[in-house]
């Protein structure tokens, strides 16, 4: 069953069942129940929010960037996108988006990738993959369970030759994206610590996450 998309503009933060500010560079995770509305807010603008989803109760079913892109026929996540699992099931549906473009192709930064792209002096800088590993271990998973992710608010245009380019973000302060959970899901976030490319404006900042019960909409 797919939930009907409901307007979310008037959701009251005071009625959220979960409201948390993720500090710059830090990870976060939480279970979102079927029918609940999940919002990510780019508090200060131009902050990439690397995100993974797993089926609560069966983490072997998890977000699939490949299936999501194939099904929607578009390179970016935005309003109307159905986020699919590796089993072909809809995990969440994007019902509102004040930014308009979210990447799900460029993946997460890692210490290894930093070294290759930016030089050996960056080898020990904190990275999203390490955040993911730290957070999924709290739920009994390992680094093998970290799969290609969504980069909410990250601007990754595709060059004419097919290459991806990470450029200045387009999300304004307070930009948000809302999703309705179509199943119970575990959301895992790395509030991206990258300082070597413009995905965070070279200055990582906090983001806010809120969850409402469906009847709050």
Image (tube, helix red, strand yellow):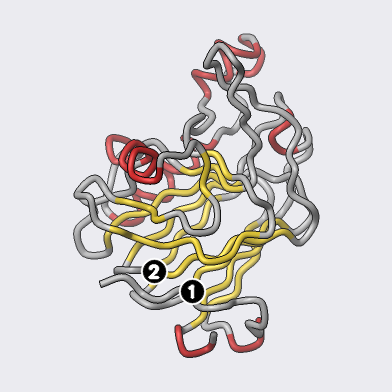
Residue 71 falls in which quadrant of the image?
top left
Mark 1 lies on a secondary structure that is strand
Please indicate whether residue 140 sits to the left or right of residue 101 in the image.
left
Few, some or many C-alpha atoms within 10 Å of disc 2 (few <14, some 14-19, many ≥20)? many
Residue 30, above or below 147:
below
x and y, in percent, of residue 146 in the image? 35, 39
- Residue at horizontal 71%, vertical 28%? 167
Label 1, residues with CA under 10 Å away: few <14, some 14-19, many ≥20: many
User: Residue at 51% of width from left, 27% of height from top?
Assistant: 110
User: Mark 2 falls on what kind of element?
Assistant: strand
Is residue 175 or residue 15 the one in the foreground? Answer: 175
Position in image of residue 19 (x %, y %): 60, 75
Q: In front: 86, or 73?
A: 73
Q: Earlier in the sequence, mark 2 or mark 1?
A: 1
CA gap, disc 2 and disc 1: 6 Å
Question: How far across and how far down the image is residue 163, in percent?
Answer: 55, 16
The reply to whether discs 2 and 1 touch (Cβ–Cβ < 8 Å) is yes
Which quadrant holds the C terminus? bottom right
Q: Residue drawn at (53%, 44%), measured in percent from left and top?
A: 50
Residue 172 relative to residue 132: left or right: right
Counting from the top left corner in percent of width and height, residue 176 is at: 66, 61
Q: Is residue 144 above or below residue 82?
A: above
Residue shown at the point (55%, 42%) measured from the top left: 151
Which of 185/126 is in front? Answer: 185
Q: Which residue is mark 2?
A: 181
Q: Tell me, for residue 37, which label it has, or none.
A: 1
Q: Is residue 130 left or right of residue 164?
A: left
Residue 36 sits in which quadrant? Answer: bottom left
Q: Quadrant of the N terminus?
A: bottom left
Q: Which mark is residue 188?
A: none
């Amino acid at each position: 069953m797919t939930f009907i998309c409901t307007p979310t503009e008037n959701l009251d933060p005071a009625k959220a069942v979960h409201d948390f500010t993720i500090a710059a560079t830090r990870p976060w995770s939480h279970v979102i129940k079927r029918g609940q509305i999940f919002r990510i807010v780019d508090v200060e603008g131009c902050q990439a929010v690397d995100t993974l989803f797993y089926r609560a109760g069966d983490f072997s079913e998890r977000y699939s960037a490949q299936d999501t892109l194939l099904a929607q026929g578009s390179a970016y996540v935005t309003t109307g996108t159905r986020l699919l699992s590796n089993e072909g099931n809809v995990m969440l549906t994007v019902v509102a988006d004040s930014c308009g473009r979210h990447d799900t192709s460029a993946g997460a930064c890692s210490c290894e990738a930093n070294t290759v792209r930016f030089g050996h002096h960056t080898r020990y800088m904190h990275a999203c993959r390490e955040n993911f590993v730290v957070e999924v271990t709290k739920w009994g998973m390992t680094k093998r369970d970290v799969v290609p992710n969504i980069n909410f608010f990250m601007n990754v245009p595709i060059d004419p030759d097919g290459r991806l380019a990470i450029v200045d973000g387009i999300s304004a302060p307070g930009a948000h994206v809302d999703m309705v959970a179509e199943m119970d899901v575990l959301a895992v976030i790395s509030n991206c610590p990258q300082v070597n490319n413009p995905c965070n404006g070279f200055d990582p900042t906090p983001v806010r996450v809120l969850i409402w019960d469906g009847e709050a909409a």
